[in-house]
Image: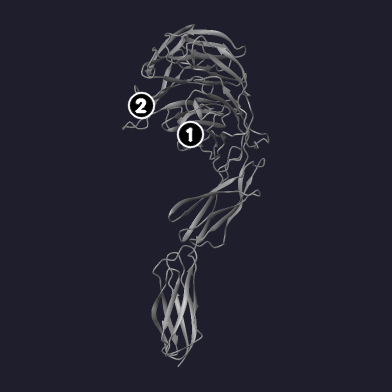
Amino acid sequence: MNRSRHYRRIASTLAALTLTTVGLTALAAPGAHAADGSAAGDTVAKLPIASYSALVVDSVHERVYVTDDRRNSIAAGQVLVYNFDGQKVGSLPTDTTPSGMALSADSSTLYVSQTSGILAFDTQTQTRTGFTLAAYNPDCPRDVAFAGGKAWHTETPANYDCDARQSWLYGASGTQSVNTGWNGAGRLRLTSGPEAPDRLVMAQARSAAEPNPFLTTFDASGDTLVRGPERRFADSDGQGALDVKDVAQSADGKRIAVADASYGTRLLDAADLSDAATGYQPLPEGAKASAVSFSGDGKYLARGAAATGSTPDLLVQPADPANGTVPLEFAFDGVLDGDRVAPRGLGWSKDGSRLFAVTTNTYGNEYWLHVIQPPAAQYDSRFTGSLSTTPGQPVVGEPVGIRGRLELDGTAPGEPVRVSAVRHDANGDRKLAPVEVDPDGSFTVLDVPSLVGDATYTVSFTGDVTHRPAEDIALTVAVTKAPTTITLTAPAEATKADGLQITGKLTGQGRALPSGITLAVERTDRKGTGALTSAAVAADGTFRINDLPAATGEVTYRVSYAGDDLHTDSTASATVRVRR
């Protein structure tokens, strides 16, 4: 059976996801172990729609709502209703094309924005309970949000060129729309939620009419909206402007995350919209942010993206950006899964046990609903004992192994664990290739030191969805020069008249010896010690010494190499008996 889904794990992701089947999909996926011992899962349902605009998750009634934003259709629209197992359980009919949705704070009412106004549905009975007439009846889509106990929606009074027209923010009085007076060029996207029940977030879409869009918040607790901080992101040269695709608020309401197609994932302090002190790591190269969502329990963050091939389209990771746990990555690249996460296509259940993701194909005319169940717990990890090296004395240019042991709590990992390491020496830091940890926890990181002197190896385990990162462990070693050796081949006897020849070879460990080496040669006989002409070393390390002895008897030849920056010095001697 063809597998079109790829779960790409950076470093040491232990948890794989098993696949169940729903609707038109039927794929096999690798087995795995979740943190609680049960298999995590990804259920996939093909959505019977050719366009998409919004996703809402109702954790109270365990329902997922998806709108079909058919701008070019004259038929009445609908909101599709799915349960938490990815099965379609109904639909909510709309009079005209729906575009946005919002859930009341108590999850009792679902608000749906359509061309002619705002519909209200009882989430228990799935019946229509109210309608707010829009000030205009345009083709341009409108957003809706619920904050301060009231529903708010946008209006773009136009039937074409929606991104260039002026949009307005409306509230409601009974069944009539009431203009708040707030407005902006192009589309205005609204976000709200139980994280900050009185806060309404407004993000302006980027367009030719507004090349430097704004992001702002409103206090909706009173009868009148009070605007809070506002921010534009372009610098003095016009670079860095916001290209918002989605906005989410953290579970405690203190942070706002923005899926910015130009930047990636922005993390802002909700109080003043300044950049948070610690942000999230960049998305994989080639991935453009399309969606973002915090789990209701405050533990996880999901980041969706549009990417091609094996580049990840979805990252699931701890919500705390200071947590170094490696994200669990998904690369959707098949006809049974979609190719990317749709804009505003992510939503969590309140308890964080399920992530719902809407994916789409390259053309944006097919859609899928994924129900992903991340592992429910994380366990501790730690390095035990101390690091050691093999061999015990590292030398420059020679392989060295840094050995250690990693201990993991919880269930046995379903895939190999990896650790990474960094070498720090006088030349700075160098990342080493990650290595797998053996089943007993032992590992050996390989390196070839390139510099003589102290080198500090720091080994890290960044964790995964089921294990927290381990505290780094380090070892400092003294890297010495590589040894060299001189071997000599000399005759046992020679005559003064005929002279003699000694051959030899200079060899060295580590990096290749430099070219142009000459060796010092000394001769010692009964008349004393004196230097001879130095011996030139050939490219293969060989050399010759030719001499006419000055005295008879035992003559000793001493050959020396002075060494270099990477190699030690060395000496060898040979004794020849010289006759007349």
Q: Is residue 292 visible?
A: yes
Q: Quadrant of the C terminus?
A: bottom left
Of the residues tagged 2 and 1, which is closer to the observer?
Answer: 1
Q: CA distance from mark 2 to mark 1?
A: 28 Å
Q: Residue furthest bottom?
A: 580
Q: Residue furthest left?
A: 237
- What element does badge 2 sit on? loop
Q: Who is closer to the viewer here, 222 or 69? A: 69
Relative height, residue 174 to residue 521 (above, below): above
Q: Who is closer to the viewer here, 227 or 211? A: 211
Left or right: residue 349 versus residue 223 is right
Q: Position of residue 8 (x, y in %)?
A: 55, 38
Residue 308 numbered tag: 1
Q: Is residue 254 visible?
A: no
- What element does badge 1 sit on? loop
Relative height, residue 126 to residue 56 (above, below): above
Q: Position of residue 114 (x, y in %)?
A: 48, 12
Q: Residue furthest front?
A: 1
Q: Position of residue 91 (x, y in %)?
A: 58, 14
Left or right: residue 278 versus residue 442 is left
Q: Quadrant of the N terminus?
A: top right
Q: Amino acid at mark 1?
A: Thr
Mark 2 vs 1, N-terminal side: 2
Q: Who is closer to the viewer here, 382 or 41? A: 41
Q: Position of residue 419 (x, y in %)?
A: 56, 47
Snapshot quadrant of residue 11: top right
Residue 20 numbered tag: none
Q: Residues within 10 Å of mark 1 (few under 14, many from 20)?
A: some
Q: Which residue is mark 2?
A: 212
